[in-house]
Amino acid sequence: MAFFEAAWNTYIAFCSPYDKILDVLQPFYRLTVDQIGVRCDDTRWLADPDEKLAEHLMIFYWLW
């Protein structure tokens, strides 16, 4: 799970949301939405993954 979190948080923090791959990544977006605010580790990120996830979701909402 640690590798997934590292990869996903890096994607969320540093990549723009791409609607062409949303169908593929939708299960991961759903999984991580349920985890907002639950993270209990002391990892520091350059950008808050929860905030960036919210940004991605708002952009998808706006595009669709």
Image (cartoon, rainbow, N blue to C red):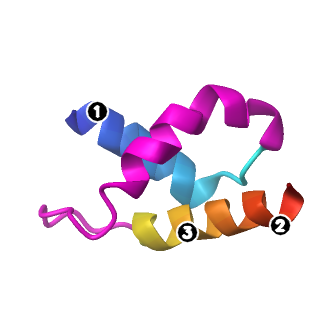
Residue kind at label 2, given as amino acid type: Trp
Counting residues from the start of the chain, the first of labels 1 and 2 encountered is: 1
Residue 43 percent location from the top left of the image:
21, 62
The kind of residue on which mark 3 rests is: Ala
Q: Residue at x 30, y 56 (%)?
A: 35
Report the magenta residues as a range.
19-46
Q: Nearer the viewer, residue 31 or 13?
A: 31
Q: Disc 1 vs disc 2: Cβ atoms closer than 8 Å?
A: no
Whether pointer 2 and pointer 3 mark residues with C-beta atoms closer than 8 Å, the reply is no
Answer yes or no: is residue 46 visible.
no
Considering every residue shown, the one lying at the far right of the view is 63
Q: Is residue 59 above or below residue 30?
A: below
Q: Residue furthest top?
A: 24
Q: CA distance from mark 2 to mark 3?
A: 12 Å
**Location of residue 25 in the rendering, given as x and y in whole percent from the top left corner:** 59, 33
Which amino acid is tagged 1? Answer: Phe
Quarter containing the N terminus: top left
Residue beneath disc 3: 54
Measured in 3D between alpha carbons, the distance from the residue under mark 1 to the one under mark 3, in whole angstroms, is 21 Å
Tell which circle, 1 or 3, labels the residue nearer the N-terminal end: 1
Out of 52 and 58, give the one closest to the viewer.
Answer: 58
Q: Relative to 2, is 63 on the left or the right?
A: right
Query: How many numbered discs?
Result: 3
Q: 58 left or right of 3?
A: right
Q: Residues within 10 Å of mark 3 (few under 14, many from 20)?
A: some
Circle 2 — which element? helix
Q: Can you tell which of label 1 and label 2 is closer to the viewer?
A: 2
Image mark for residue 37:
none
Q: Which mark is residue 3?
A: 1
Residue occupying image coordinates x 53% and y 59%:
13
The crowding category of the residue bearing disc 2, from other C-alpha atoms within 10 Å (few below 14, some 14 to 19, many at least 20), is few
> In this figure, which residue is indicated by the disc labeled 2?
62
